[in-house]
Image (cartoon, helix red, strand yellow):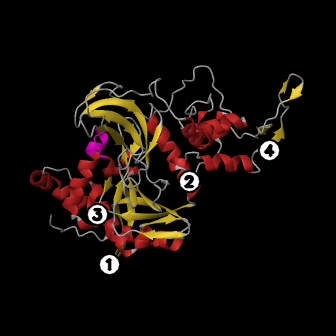
Amino acid sequence: MAEIEIRLPKMGESVTEATITNWLKEVGDTVELDEPLVEVATDKVDNELPSEVEGVLVKKLFEKDEVAQVGDVIALISTDGDAAPVESTPDAVVEPEVIEQVAAPVAAATATVSAPVDLPKSSSGGRFYSPLVRSIAKEEGISIEQLDNISGSGENGRVTKKDILAYLNSGQAQQVAAAPVVENNKPAESSRTKTVEVKEHKINVPVYPGDEIIEMDRMRKLIADHMVMSVHTSPHVTSYVEADVTNIVNWRNKVKGEFAKREGEKMTFTPIFMEAIVKAIKDFPMVNVSVDGNKIIKRKDINLGMATALPSGNLIVPVIKNADTLNLTGITKKVNDLAGRARENNLQADEIAGGTYTVTNVGTFGNVMGTPIINQPQVAILALGAIRKIPSVIETEQGDFIGIRHKMFLSHSYDHRVVDGALGGMFVKRVADYLEQFDPNREL
């Protein structure tokens, strides 16, 4: 019988794992080539994974809500057309010598994951825990609330075996002796005679009459975890600069009709701002980096992430790859395409991966400025404030006078581990300079 292993494919360069959200086929079902087999969710996007072969689904190795790593075998498909037996037949004969040779190592390897586990797969906050972590937690008397307080080193802060063992051995976990189990008036010989007493730091949130409790959806939980992780990872500093964008406003008003007729696209301010940001990144490439321990990874490509609000109220960040190779028309088409498909939940995994610098337009909601959180593993993010008409001092050769100008604030948050105030401040000032120096007679 030929059985083909179906593995979790790579779904973007920064995606290392995915949660099984729904199996579209059950064991014994016939599966066609390229027919959707399973739905998975990453911290970036949801995907349907098609079958790589035609046959019969004979085994699912991950259940709904379990997390698989990229490359893990998630299912077996028989190409012979018949479902394979899931378990060994009772008539199978195994030589005693073989049993003795493999019993000990197999028992040692599976002991930690075969114990009964009563803890849920995830906490009320949506944080998932592997069977191994839950097994250790159960044996050590760690509650789900205590697990929630452990800082994880895995993807998106996930708790690993290493994390929970370090937690048990650290000063955070004060172990006290537990009374041994007595059976037939004899103390039981057990290697686990200690329990864990942990001081919890959980905020008690009162619920008052008339309050409504709303469960976070999966995407909101992922965003929350990612934001907490980013603030925990990077010391954030924010610099602000005000820019006069009167020339840009006047130019766009002049050309937007012609551009729409010629290109079939709407000309917004975002592509113009993106163009200026790309120029500034070229001038200050050390904002286009990532941190790996004590190493700085200087990115060759300039891949601009653009934070996009979804109809659900959640947020997603599609990426304009190689933005420095595009002219203003090209950036405009990319911005409109990615933003439109993001709102329709129609982005591919690789379209939200690989960003090296992110831009968020808080001015869309009338906000004058903001303090954006860095999109890890990047080291900086720029918030674009609302464009406002304000009275301003205008300097001319004939003297100063007061006039009405279109102005906006730029808020630049950066990782102070590698971006100091001088670099972070000079970068955002350079973006403002490019905006203010925009040619009002520019041709499309």
Placement of 396 over or under 304, stated as above or below:
below
- As measured in the structure, the alpha-carbon distance from the residue carrying label 2 to the one carrying label 1 is 49 Å
Residue count near mark 2 (Cα–Cα under 10 Å), binned few <14, some 14–19, many ≥20:
some
Q: Which dot marks residue 398? A: 1
Placement of 298 over or under 177, stated as above or below:
below
Please identify the quarter of the rendering in which residue 276 is found.
bottom left
Nearer-N-terminus badge (4/3): 4
Residue count near mark 1 (Cα–Cα under 10 Å), binned few <14, some 14–19, many ≥20:
few
Nearer-N-terminus badge (2/1): 2
* Location of the C terminus (image quadrant): bottom left
Measured from the top left, where is residue 90 in percent x and y? 47, 23
Marks 3 and 1: which is nearer the front? Answer: 3
Name the residue tied to disc 4.
174
- As measured in the structure, the alpha-carbon distance from the residue carrying label 4 to the one carrying label 2 is 28 Å
- As measured in the structure, the alpha-carbon distance from the residue carrying label 4 to the one carrying label 1 is 76 Å
Amino acid at dot 3: Asn
Nearer-N-terminus badge (4/2): 4
Marks 4 and 2: which is nearer the front? Answer: 4
- As measured in the structure, the alpha-carbon distance from the residue carrying label 3 to the one carrying label 1 is 44 Å
Work out whether residue 129 or residue 436 is closer to the camera in this orientation and state it. 129
Residues in magenta? 340-348
Name the residue tied to disc 3.
322
Q: Secondary structure at mark 1?
A: loop
